[in-house]
Image (cartoon, helix red, strand yellow):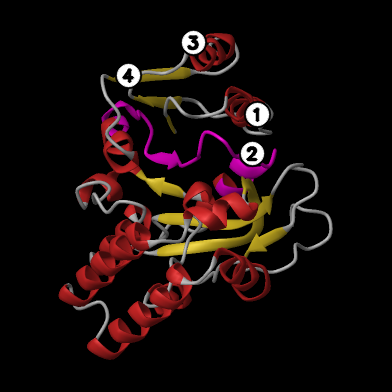
Amino acid sequence: MSVYGRERPEFFSAALQSLVNQSRPAEQVVLVCDGPLTEELDSVIERYRSVLPLSVIRLPENLGLSHALNEGLPACKREWLARFDSDDVCEAARFELQLNFIAQHSDIDVVGGNILEFSVDETSPDSARIVRESHSEIVSAAKFKNPLNHVTVFMRNSAIRAVGGYPHDVQNEDYALWVKLILSGYKLANMPDYLVRVRGGADMVSRRGGWAYLRAEYKLQSGFKKQGFIGPSVFVFNVAARIAIRLCPHFVRLFLYRNFLRVRPRTGGLA
């Protein structure tokens, strides 16, 4: 987990509390402070030291998510790593479900799941992002979109380090990592369960527009083409689709997310 100075203390606290509430608690929680934190964020960390097995790494300056996560990898003492964000909320059974899955699927190197998105109240999600489950489906989906929900994944430490950790693709470090793993022969899967509740809504959609976001995606797709993961026709299609979504007015992008890129959550939350 990485946290930085602009995070809201109440969101950070809720994220850590969801780790406390796990039916199968984590044996280690590696927290990378990506640059100086506020006093309020530091106080949250101190409050949870007594109830979580925290290993805190402090970076002198803000380096960005991929750098922060790579700095945290050497401190991880276990083979299986659970990825999580500092403002989201894990379902209480998340770790138990994923540990049971990997015990039954020894060939899998990364396993994720579905997410619920909420704007204000985590108990009332607005939408869900559902992902394909089998490795072959994930490979096919990855040619067009990010096939895993980053905040839900369990990953083999050895696999991530073998491919050199997270690529430094701003805003797309996880997507780039999945493709690196696929091209290196590792197997990925998703569970059908909702594993994490994510802060979404209009603010999230707003952050996913504009020229900076589009440039980052163009660079990512160019990299995929250079690696041979996608061909020229898929590259053109992907770039054209992203131009339409990233540069359209905010209200149009919000409509597309709500009606085409997301689904209504299933009743009951956790599957």
Residue plotted at (33% across, 78% down):
239
* Circle 3: residue type: Glu
Highlighted magenta segment, given as a residue range: 72-98
* Circle 2: residue type: Val
Kindly report the distance in space between the C-alpha atoms of the residues bearing marks 4 and 2.
Answer: 23 Å
**How far across and how far down the image is residue 6, in percent?**
47, 29
**Residue 185 shows up from this direction:** no
According to the image, label 2 marks what residue? 89
Badge 1 vs badge 3, beta-carbon distance below 8 Å:
no
Return the disc, 1 or 3, that comes first in the chain's sequence.
1
According to the image, label 1 marks what residue? 14
Front tag of 1 and 3: 3
Kindly report the distance in space between the C-alpha atoms of the residues bearing marks 1 and 3.
Answer: 17 Å
| Disc 4 packing (10 Å; few <14; some 14–19; many ≥20) | some
Vertical arrangement, residue 74 with respect to residue 204, above or below: above
**SS label for mark 1:** helix
Return the disc, 4 or 2, that comes first in the chain's sequence.
4
* Circle 4: residue type: Arg
In reply to whether residue 266 is colored magenta, the answer given is no
Return the disc, 3 or 2, that comes first in the chain's sequence.
3
| Disc 2 packing (10 Å; few <14; some 14–19; many ≥20) | many
**SS label for mark 3:** helix
Question: In the drawing, does residue 161 fall left or right of residue 270?
Answer: left
Kindly report the distance in space between the C-alpha atoms of the residues bearing marks 4 and 3.
Answer: 14 Å
